[in-house]
Image (spheres, rainbow, N blue to C red):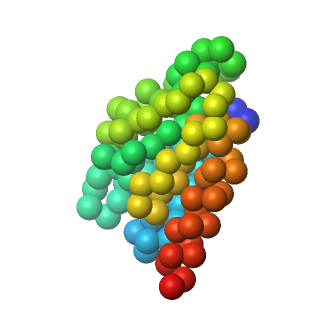
Amino acid sequence: GLAPMVDMPENELLKKVIKETYERNAVVGAVCHGPVSLLNVKLSNGTYLVNGKNITSFTDEEERGYAIADVPFLLETALTKQGAKFHAAAVWSDHSIADGNLVTGQNPASAKGVAEKMIVILESAAK
């Protein structure tokens, strides 16, 4: 949904939890508009979590065809401004990316792929 676009980018508790989770090498995953929760998360070294990471989310193209009037900013653009290496597939297609312990999905069709990638990471960590 669209509510995360308003509620998550400046939520200090959420940023703290994501930072701590990521820095202890636990898996962090987000789908569709969910990667908005990764915005403004700064790691202990002062860099943005998404900086240099291969990532995806709901794309600017998808937003323009869906709810452009209802969002305060374009998520793909915002992630890219913080240094993310953004990867987009065809509109509304299943597309997920794992970069280390960070897993993201482009849209609702990507949820299964994100879950499967997270399971692989969790299983390999358990060995």
Q: Position of residue 105 (x, y in %)?
A: 58, 44
Above or below for 12 versus 75:
below
- Residue at 52% in and 54% down: 103
What residue occupies the far bottom of the structure in this picture?
A: 127
19 left or right, relative to 90: left
- Residue at 33% in and 46% down: 51
44 left or right, relative to 35: left
Q: Position of residue 76 (x, y in %)?
A: 48, 30
Q: Position of residue 102 (x, y in %)?
A: 47, 57
- Residue at 32% in and 64% down: 44
Above or below for 121 versus 39:
below
13 left or right, relative to 1: left
Q: Position of residue 82 (x, y in %)?
A: 35, 38
- Residue at 53% in and 60% down: 28
Q: Nearer the viewer, residue 53 or 83?
A: 53
Q: Quadrant of the N terminus?
A: top right
Regarding residue 73, the answer to whether it shows in the image is no
Quadrant assignment, res 84: top left
Q: Nearer the viewer, residue 58 or 38?
A: 58
Regarding residue 79, the answer to whether it shows in the image is yes
Q: Nearer the viewer, residue 16 or 74?
A: 74
Quadrant assignment, res 42: bottom left
Image mark count: 0
Above or below for 27 versus 83:
below
